Image: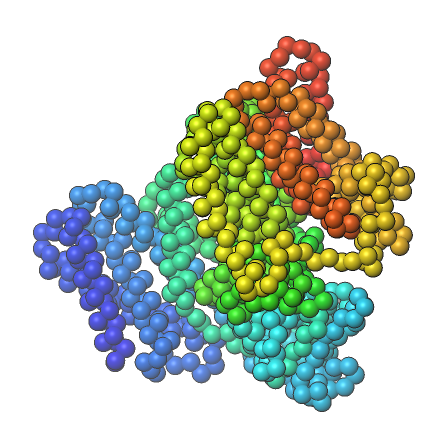
Amino acid sequence: MKLLFIICGLAILFSAFQYFFHLRVAALKQPWTYFFRMFIVNVILSILFLILLKIIQTLSLPDWDLLSWKIDSTNLKLSFLSVWIAVFLSTLLFFRSIYPKYKKKFGMANAIVLCFLVSIILEIFVFNFRHFELISTDEKNIDVPLDTVIYLNRPLSETDGIIKNTKTAFAIKENSLVFNPNIADVRNIRIVTGENSKENLAFGITITQEKIDPAVLYFGEQFILPYYDGNPIFRFRNDKPGQEITLYFGNAIYESYLQIKSIILNQEIPFKINFYRICFFALLFYLSYIFLCRKFCLLAGLYLFCKTNWKRILFCIVCIAGIQFLLDRTERPFFFVFLIVSIALLVFNLFILIRQNHTNENILICILFGLGMIVRTIYVLSSPWQVHQHDVIGHHISEGHLGYILNIFTHSALPNSADPWQFIHPPLHHLLGAVYLKILAFLGLLSTEPFEQLQFLTLFYGILILILSLKLLRVLGIKNSSLIYSFSVLCFHPQLIFLSGSLNNDELLLLFTLAGLYCAIRWSEFSSKKYLLFAALFTGLAMVTKTSGVLLLPAILLLIFIKKCLLEKKFPSFLIDSIIFIAVFSLAAGWWVIRCQTVLSIPINSIYYQGEASPQYIGNYSFVQRLFSLDPAHFQSLFVRFDNKQFADFSIPISIIKSSIFGGWEFERKGIAFILIFSNLLLILGSIFAMLKKIDTLKEKNLMIPFLYIVYCIQVFSFLFFCFRYPHTCTQDFRYIVITLIIGICFLGLLMKAYVETKNRFKHIIVSAFRITILLFDVCSIFIVM
């Protein structure tokens, strides 16, 4: 009865809001009758929806009783949600019965209501899909006695439930539990952990029906972040329901331990409502509606098809059913949903461009951008998070870039020591990763695959890099076929695709460096203070992402000097612009310099020096050998070799050519790899030739091309200094100067544009050769990364 009074009170409150809003958009003939009707409809709908939600909540319980409703937090949440749904539906219903004065307000309110309704349906049926999954399960909450769980050939109970995983001398040892659950259908497994487990930042879990390969166990498939959830429910499906099975269970983060208090099969998953998540997705849907449907008309065809509210709701329900189907049947559902959305946006965008009679250039650029985004998503979707990573994880989970992120996530503060491996890096990338995990945890979206969810950030950075690269090519005046072929290299280049799934800070560094370079070029064109401020900001952010980001600083200062002093002869203006640039840069990056000196007590340019005992040490080769050697041993493998006990690639140019395509890894398709590296060599030579041909533009007043030369030279010379100061094969990796890839493609695009516009037949042949090489490169790249 008390719950009924609460529903009536909420209905009166929301009905009053509806009433006053309707008064602002329409003239009501009988206002109080209108208010009374809204109140009655809201109360009736609220009670009906509350009954429906209670049925959903208690359907999986054997002793559910709809008549015993106590006033607790769960019932209050369900009451509030039922009133909310009723109010939204009544708003749609009563809007049809009045004539709005202001069409814009009416349309906006209509869209907001629909967005909230869709997010509520999403919350009930998608984010609680595992609750529904257990409704049809007969055997629930089955305890597995620890005496029946075997660990190291004895019962787990004898070790107080503690299992350990260690890694010594790069040897991976099997470390697993074995138990035989004699139940027909296993859907999930709940691990209740002890206090000792909370001392770990994270530990990985692998649960299989076949014996675990130690190499698979080493990384694990699902992960516990004790700070967030110490007692997780792991998703598991019995491959052979109805038969007795043997489950192998492993703790897979090295030097971590897990104290197990109990193992429960088919632990019941409660029906939970997260209002923050509802509001978040409603806002996301509304912004998508504003920017996609109304501003860019990407979904105009779909929007015109769904002209009425019931069609829109029906379409959303179908989409939500599809999302739930994907969540239920894919290992990485959010990436899969993102892939489907990317394909849908590509198709609708092409539909609109074709209908609006856009040029072939715009249509092909749209196709390339969409395919670049799709290829990156498929790569991240199909590759485990451990693949193609640099310095992400060390001998312990508290080390490496991943340990850096988890440390900030757990302690909500920057680490006060730079001793752990990779903790000497500036913290912006790791801070963003930790904040991203906290937002997911707050919204209840953090899964047992948090490291794979982190890849969504770098995937997002990769898409922004594509957008900035396209803008840079267009600003430089590259257009038509030259733009299409140049942009295609950036869309499908393996190095950029690998970085889109990386968990270290290289991708964010490239994004900020490219953004700073683009803004500096725009400033050189318009002398706008806005672009100068953004260039300074992005340069500072690049530095607090990775120390090498500071290399953009002298390039931009030199650009300011050339423009203001040498060309315009305005020395006071040079001083003003330089002071503004340095001031903004200092605000963005100065705090990290101070922190290094006061808190961490390390130099700003600190790195981990492996020493001469490292198998990667190549300091015994001379300067000439490392720059000009053509030792036949270099060509015995297409891939970079690191171990100097056999042979290490000591030549810097050859290491750059190899690592620019394959990184530090090997691939099985040797034939495609050979074609790819050969076409890559041709493109490198072509970009160098283009840079030499464009030297005459240095005399012009247009500073865009000279600035690209400045950035390129600073990057290359600092990289060579780095390679000779720290002579190891790992320091010769192309990822340290990946910005030169984009600059080189810009010069190649400028060369093709200039040659296409001439009537020289030989130059046209050169352009055709470049086009064939690019097409070959793009196709082979897709085969390598997939």
**Position of 31 compared to 579: left or right?**
left
Split into 4 quadrants, where in the image is the N terminus?
bottom left
- The x and y percentages for residue 429 are 55, 55
Q: What colouring does the structure picture have?
A: rainbow
Residue at image point 67% right, 84% down: 161
Q: Is residue 346 left or right of residue 750?
A: left
* Nearer-the-camera pick, 693 or 39: 693
Horizontal and vertical percent position of residue 368? 58, 34
Whether residue 769 is visible to the viewer of this picture, yes or no, is yes
Q: Residue at x 58, y 46 (%)?
A: 549
**Quadrant in which residue 736 is drawn:** top right
Along the horizontal axis of the image, is 532 left or right of 673?
Answer: left
Camera-nearest residue between 85 and 623: 623
The residue at 55%/20% (across/down) is 700
Q: Is residue 117 left or right of residue 333?
A: left
Front residue of 72 and 46: 72
Tell me: residue 532, above or below residue 326: above
Percent coordinates x, y for residue 350 in the rendering = 50, 33
Q: Which one is in front, 549 or 10? A: 549
> Considering only vertical position in the picture, is 516 above or below 237?
above
Q: Give the farthest residue toward the top.
A: 759
Residue 249 in percent (x, y) is at 70, 74
**Res 396 quadrant in image:** bottom right
52 relative to 321, above or below: below
